[in-house]
Amino acid sequence: MKLKITIEMDNAAFADDGNDGRSEAARILAIIARKLDQGVDTCGRTIDHNGNNVGDWKISGGGK
């Protein structure tokens, strides 16, 4: 099984977070982590705090 996360950090939401984009990336990763923990989704878009689609995430494969 594989988890792939893509986040493009070249927009204002990352530039304006005061932490070189790390705070916004961490916020997005926390959202993904909650969805994984709840078993809600196996894929989705990554959305910045301005509402822009900045990438995606997906669990693929299966078995051992």
Image: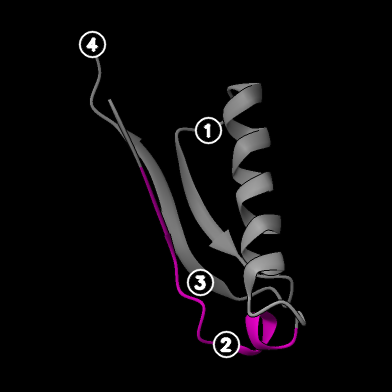
User: How far across and how far down the image is residue 19, in percent?
Assistant: 72, 77
* Residue 41's disc number: 1
In the visual, does 26 lie left or right of 60?
right
* Residue found at the very far front of the displayed protein: 19
Regarding mark 2 in the picture, which secondary structure is present there?
A: loop
Quadrant of residue 17 within the rendered picture? bottom right
Going by the numbered disc 2, the residue's amino acid type is Asn
How many marks overall?
4
The residue that mark 2 highlights is 11
Label whose residue precedes the other's in the sequence (2 or 1): 2
Q: How far apart, in angstroms, are the residues tagged by discs 1 and 4?
A: 18 Å
Q: Is residue 39 left or right of residue 60?
A: right
Q: Tag 4: Cα neighbours inside 10 Å, few (<14), some, or many (≥20)?
A: few
Label at residue 30 = none
Segment tinted magenta in the rendering: 4-16
- How far is mark 4 from mark 2, CA to CA? 37 Å
Q: Earlier in the sequence, mark 3 or mark 1?
A: 1
At mark 3, the secondary structure is strand
**Tag 2–tag 3 contact (CB < 8 Å):** yes
Q: Is residue 39 above or below residue 3?
A: above
Q: Earlier in the sequence, mark 1 or mark 4?
A: 1
Q: Disc 3 residue type?
A: Val
State the image quarter where residue 60 is shown: top left
* Alpha carbon distance from label 2 to label 3: 9 Å
Quarter of the view holding residue 32: top right
Residue at image coords 23%, 26%: 61
Q: Which residue carries the number 3 mark?
A: 54
Q: Which numbered disc flags the more N-terminal residue, 4 or 2?
A: 2
Percent across and percent down for residue 30 are 68, 46
Q: Residues within 10 Å of mark 3 (few under 14, many from 20)?
A: some
